[in-house]
Structure formats: structure tokens, C-alpha cells
Image (cartoon, grey):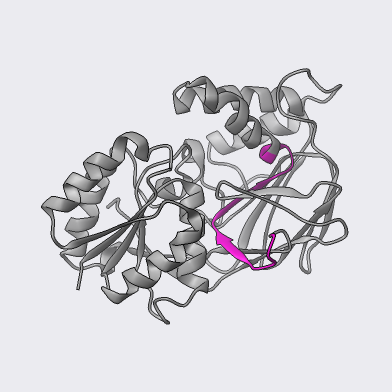
């Protein structure tokens, strides 16, 4: 039995320089079972093989899209039965939101060393429970997919603009994200469509089961089961299991600046902010002319008249690396 099983995607951006170091590390530690995939559609077969070695911990080494595909297979494919191993995520890719939430930051090899150290000791103190978001209604084959962070409205447009227009410039991730944020804020200011920058968000209808609807144009639509977001922001009630967190910000520069200020000072969700809607729910519908959303780096679109439906899964185990 391997203590640690490591699933790597060599094609993720971070692995272009990292993977040789990962391979060398695994070669030096025989209690790591390393499996590499070239395509996302190989993840299911990879996990079927990994399940046979009965790892104590499963580590995912790839971008957010790789993590999303692996989570879907782990908890919907039934490869590990009713007792999947706790999942750890190496810091990799462009945003690393899931790794960041689980306390993994900095050098990926250092994080892998920490995982191995924990796997050789008592895991209980490091296991945390997280719910996943189950998305249905926006997939090509109709099958639900699982993830932990969903962006829509102007946020999705900004993420796509960053991916297709800013990342190719070769800027450091921090600068690329800051530039995308500034362009997103300018877009949220309203007015006519700029010749550059994210497209103007379309009108959406967002409904939370038993709590009503929110209609309009939004600069941010965010649904998550993560406890921490970028910049260390933690929304009120994030440590409670039982429902997804929904954050919607009106397409207004004032509303967006109020929300950013509240988030930086840790007051988001603790005080009422004009133009900011913060809810918790166990079923959320998103519908509109272009209901495009991004779940853990992957784009999904609902057909006209068919909403994207989000539901939380039961709590599942993850490995938190920070003390």
C-alpha cells in the first residue's frame, strides 16, 4: 500500500518547469505512487488504477481544471467506494484557489514533502471537511461535475479575458491578476463597451431555493464552498458546513469598491453593504441570455431556458497542510 498517490497533469502550465523536480522527488521516495495523465479524459482510468494501491492520501498536481476533473471522478465515479482518501492539492496553475484554501502555498516540492510527513503520522489532526459544488445543466453530456469555486457574470468575463488576453503576455501571475482586476473594475463602471477589456456582462436571474431571486447585470457572481479566497478574504460563516456561499455584486463601481473594501477589512457578510447580496443556500439556479460560468477553471454554458443548477455534496475529506 502506498502512503501517497500523486496524480499529475504534465500539460498544466505550472508543471512545464515543475514536473522534472516532482519526478525526481518521487523516485527518491518509494512510498509515493506517481501517475501522469496527458488528457483530462484519462483521469477516470488513472483513479481506477490509483484506487488499487489504496493510498493513505491522494495528491493532485495540476491546475484548477485538473483538480475539478479529479474531484468529479473521485466522488462521482465510485473508484474508492464509500471511503475515499483525503485529498491534498499542490500549489500549481495560475490561481491555486483550492490549494490556497487548504494551506498549500509556495514551492510545490515543499508542499509534497509536508504531505508525505503528515501521511507518515496521524492524519486526523490535518483532515478537514469540505462540501463540493455539484453543477448540472451546463455540461455537454448532461453529467454533473464537481468543484469548489464558481464565477459568473462580469467575474467570469474578467477571468476569461485574463486567460485569453493577459496570460499570453507572459506576465507574472500576480501582475496579470492585478491588471485583470483593474480592467474588471473599469468594465463594472458601466457606460459603453470598451475597445479592450472584458465584455459587458449580460442580465442574469439568480435564484436561491426558498430565499427568492436577484435579477440584473452584475460585476461579480461567485458561488463557493471554499473558506478563503484570494487576498486572504474570508466571508462570514465560511467555517460552517451545510450550504454554498453566494456573493452577487451589482454592476456598479461604487458597489464593487464597497465590497472590495469590506472584504479587505474582514467585514464582508458581517455588515450590510449597498449593492452587495450575500446568501447561503443548498440549491442555486443561474439563468440568462448567456449563462456562462467558470467552475474551477472550466467553462460551462446553459442552453436557453435551461438554468445552471448548483447543489452542495455531502462533506468530503481534504488534507490541510497548514498547522
User: Left or right: where does residue 232 sit relative to residue 206?
Assistant: left
**x 56%, y 70%: residue:** 313
- For the N terminus, the image quarter is bottom left
- The one nearer the camera, 31 or 201, is 31
Count of number-bearing discs? 0
14 over 189 or under it: above or below: below
Q: In the rendered image, which quarter is residue 165 located in?
A: top right
User: Left or right: where does residue 284 sit relative to residue 106?
Assistant: right
62 over 274 or under it: above or below: below
Q: In the rendered image, which quarter is residue 190 located in?
A: top right
Residue 260 percent coordinates (x, y): 62, 33
Residue 295 percent coordinates (x, y): 60, 52
Q: In the rendered image, which quarter is residue 203 located in?
A: top right
Q: Farthest residue to the top: give it.
A: 195
- The one nearer the camera, 128 or 192, is 192
**x 39%, y 37%: residue:** 14
- The one nearer the camera, 88 or 302, is 302
Residue 133 percent coordinates (x, y): 59, 62
91 over 123 or under it: above or below: above
- In the rendered image, residue 226 lying in the magenta stretch gets the answer no
**x 42%, y 76%: residue:** 79
155 over 283 or under it: above or below: above
Magenta part of the chain: 140-156
- In the rendered image, residue 151 lying in the magenta stretch gets the answer yes
**x 13%, y 55%: residue:** 29
Could one spot residue 315 in this view of the protein?
Answer: no
Residue 141 percent coordinates (x, y): 68, 65
Could one spot residue 112 in this view of the protein?
Answer: yes
Amino acid at each position: 500500500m502506498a502512503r501517497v498517490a500523486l496524480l499529475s497533469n504534465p500539460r498544466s502550465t505550472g508543471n512545464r518547469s515543475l514536473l522534472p523536480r516532482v519526478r525526481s522527488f518521487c523516485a527518491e521516495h518509494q512510498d509515493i505512487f506517481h501517475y501522469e495523465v496527458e488528457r483530462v479524459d484519462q483521469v477516470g482510468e488513472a483513479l481506477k488504477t490509483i484506487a488499487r494501491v489504496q493510498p493513505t492520501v491522494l495528491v493532485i498536481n495540476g491546475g484548477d481544471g485538473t483538480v475539478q476533473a479529479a474531484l468529479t471522478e473521485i466522488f462521482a465515479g465510485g473508484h474508492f467506494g464509500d471511503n475515499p482518501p483525503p485529498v491534498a492539492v499542490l500549489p500549481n496553475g495560475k490561481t491555486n484557489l483550492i490549494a490556497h484554501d487548504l494551506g498549500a502555498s509556495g514551492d510545490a516540492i515543499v508542499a509534497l514533502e509536508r504531505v508525505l510527513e503528515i501521511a507518515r503520522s496521524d492524519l486526523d489532526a490535518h483532515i478537514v471537511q469540505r462540501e463540493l459544488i455539484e453543477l448540472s445543466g451546463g455540461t455537454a453530456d448532461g453529467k454533473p461535475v464537481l468543484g469548489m469555486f464558481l464565477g459568473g457574470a462580469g467575474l467570469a468575463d474578467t477571468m476569461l479575458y485574463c486567460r485569453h488576453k493577459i496570460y499570453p503576455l507572459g506576465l507574472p501571475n500576480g501582475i496579470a491578476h492585478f491588471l485583470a482586476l483593474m480592467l474588471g473594475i473599469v468594465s463594472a463602471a458601466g457606460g459603453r463597451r470598451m475597445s479592450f477589456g472584458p465584455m459587458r456582462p449580460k442580465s442574469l436571474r439568480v435564484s436561491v431555493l426558498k430565499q427568492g431571486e436577484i435579477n440584473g447585470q452584475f460585476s461579480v457572481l461567485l458561488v463557493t464552498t471554499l473558506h478563503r479566497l484570494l487576498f486572504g478574504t474570508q466571508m462570514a460563516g465560511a467555517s460552517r458546513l451545510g450550504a454554498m456561499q453566494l456573493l452577487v455584486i451589482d454592476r456598479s463601481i461604487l458597489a464593487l469598491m464597497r465590497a472590495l473594501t469590506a472584504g479587505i477589512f474582514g467585514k464582508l457578510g458581517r455588515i450590510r453593504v449597498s449593492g452587495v447580496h450575500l446568501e447561503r443556500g443548498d440549491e442555486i439556479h443561474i439563468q440568462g441570455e448567456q449563462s456562462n460560468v467558470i467552475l474551477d477553471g472550466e467553462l460551462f454554458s446553459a442552453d436557453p431556458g435551461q438554468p445552471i443548477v448548483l447543489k452542495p455534496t455531502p462533506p468530503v475529506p481534504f488534507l490541510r497542510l497548514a498547522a
